[in-house]
Amino acid sequence: MIIFPAIDIKNGKVVRLIQGKFDSVTEYGNDPLAMAQHWENKGATWIHVVDLDGAKEGAMKNTAVILKMAHNVKAALQVGGGIRTKEDIAKLIDGGVSRVILGTKIVEEKTFLKESLSLWKDKIAVSLDCSNGRVLQKGWTSQTNIKAVDFIPELERLGLKCLIYTDIAKDGMLCGPNFEALEEILNITKIPVIASGGISSLEDIKKLHLLEKKGLVGAITGKAIYEGKLDLKEALKIIKIC
């Protein structure tokens, strides 16, 4: 299982939101590259990066700083937020990003995912950000009537190889992941799944690691490592010895 430190970028700064709300912002630094290097020095082999401005506005706004990160850290980057065109994807992958995360666009236009998968295969991930089991879009500002459990089999048929599942109600709350919803997702798909939202302790990491046999391949952590609730080095040790 891979642990992904999260770097969310808003107005060029490293921030965290609570439950995806743009009016609940906490800043953790002015230099996303320095933060990426910090987590890399702690042992991270992958880093999860989100262009929050892009997610909200529907077009990437922090591409330059993300590409700078890709050029200056050895850790692999997976990047999402405001990616709406194949040109966006190509720019990121050509610039050294290892995996591109699609969200809103594929909900609105499934042919975009099919075309992207045909071009970039396992370099494409889909993030399903959910509230009460239903998919959110447009920077978590709009809830659809689409149930994640109904949508995921369609993603599997299209050949998706990486799914990120976020429970927005848990995100930034430091109250533990929604294990029930996560297990429900793992039980209906063979797509490798990365969990996000609510991870707050080493105990959470241990419980998530037990789900590896069901198809959980990673966990994204943000606020917990920024607030000192979770020690990244210790978490990485746990998944190596368990």
Image (tube, grey):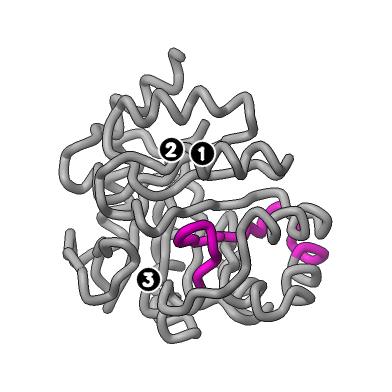
Residue 107, position as x, y percentages in the image:
65, 73
Q: Amino acid at mark 2?
A: Ile
The residue under the point 31% across, 50% down is 222
- 161 lies left or right of 181: right
Residue 219, position as x, y percentages in the image:
45, 40
Residue 53, position as x, y percentages in the image:
37, 79
The residue under the point 30% across, 34% down is 232
Residue 11, position as x, y percentages in the image:
27, 78
Residue nearer the viewer, 33 or 124: 124
Q: Amino acid at mark 1?
A: Gly
Label 3 CA crowd tier, 10 Å (few <14, some 14–19, many 20+): some
Q: Amino acid at mark 3?
A: Val
Look at mark 2 in the image and give the residue it sits on: 3
Q: Which mark sits nearer the N-terminus, 3 or 2?
A: 2
Q: Are marks 1 and 2 in contact (CB under 8 Å)?
A: yes
- SS class, disc 1: strand
- 91 lies left or right of 198: right
Q: Which mark sits nearer the N-terminus, 1 or 3?
A: 3
Residue 217 sits in quarter? top right
Look at mark 1 in the image and give the residue it sits on: 218
From which residue to which does the magenta span run? 117-136
